[in-house]
Amino acid sequence: MPTREVLHGDGVAFLARRQLPASHALVTSMPDGSELPGLGFSGWRDWFVETAALVAGQTHDDSVAIFFQTDVKREGAWVDKGYLVARGAERAGAELLWHKVVCRAPAGTVTFGRPAYAHLQCFSRRLRLDPKDSSADVLPRLGDMPWPRAMGVEACAAVCNFLRTLPAITTVVDPFCGIGTMLAVANAHGFDAIGVERSAKRAKRASALTLDHAARRRGGSDG
């Protein structure tokens, strides 16, 4: 059976201490500015880019780092997290393998504060994909969310379906795992999973979350 290990701690410190092996893919959604209010907006932007660089940099050259992020609106202007992630990945010497748009609401829906889509971006320093292995660039549904800042279950499943095309990958690592949606979906697809979460309460939930629980509950906007 696939294994799951959830550590209560700081995801940045976890990554800084180790270079992941080629068998480990890193899949995460990094914290929004509202989750790190002490940094201020400009401080959070710098932290976000630096952390994206760390995520991509600590991923093995022959593996992948995948980010799920939703833009936010601040003082009437959009903060493009896809762009910030790309800046960090470039700093680490990683190239973009694919960038998918995940629909958070049906096309034509007007939304406020958050867009009707999310970014799903995959980077690697050395791995390259054959064009014949391309997949859809637009995912029509996010899927159910077990908590307001979760990756949607269908988005997580799309990531796992992609990872199954990479024979070396056995383990999914999420250093900002929340209550463990990505970990639960990874286990359901046969991958071992390692998560890190700074909230003890969420880390405990992440240890026990199952795909059935994730699929039954719905949330609001993701982080």
Image (cartoon, rainbow, N blue to C red):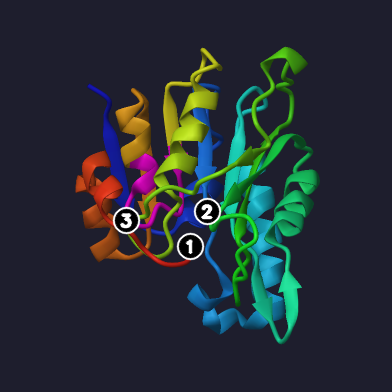
Q: CA distance from mark 1 to mark 2?
A: 9 Å
Name the residue located 55 percent from the left edge and 25 percent from the top edge: 162
Question: Mark 3 = which residue?
Answer: 146
Pointers 3 and 1 in contact (C-beta within 8 Å): no
Q: CA distance from mark 2 to mark 3?
A: 14 Å
Determine whether 132 is above or below 27 in the image: above
Q: Position of residue 31 (x, y in %)?
A: 52, 64
Nearest to the observer: residue 97 or residue 104: 104
Name the residue located 26 percent from the left edge and 29 percent from the top edge: 3
Pointers 1 and 2 in contact (C-beta within 8 Å): yes
**For mark 2, does the 10 Å Cα neighbourhood hold few (<14), some (14 to 19), or many (20 or more) residues?**
many
Determine whether 45 is above or below 20 in the image: below
Which is nearer the N-term, disc 1 or disc 2? 2
Question: Mark 2 = which residue?
Answer: 29
Q: Position of residue 82 (x, y in %)?
A: 71, 55
Q: Amino acid at mark 2?
A: Ser
Name the residue located 45 percent from the left edge and 45 percent from the top edge: 174
The quadrant in which residue 134 appears is top right
Which is nearer the N-term, disc 2 or disc 3? 2
Nearest to the observer: residue 53 or residue 190: 190
Instruction: Assign a secondary structure to mark 2.
Output: loop
- If the image is split into quadrants, where does the N terminus sit? top left
Q: Of tags 1 and 2, which is closer to the observer?
A: 1
Residue 222's disc number: 1
Q: Amino acid at mark 1?
A: Asp
Q: Which residues are magenta?
A: 173-183
Pointers 2 and 3 in contact (C-beta within 8 Å): no
Name the residue located 60 percent from the left edge and 80 percent from the top edge: 39
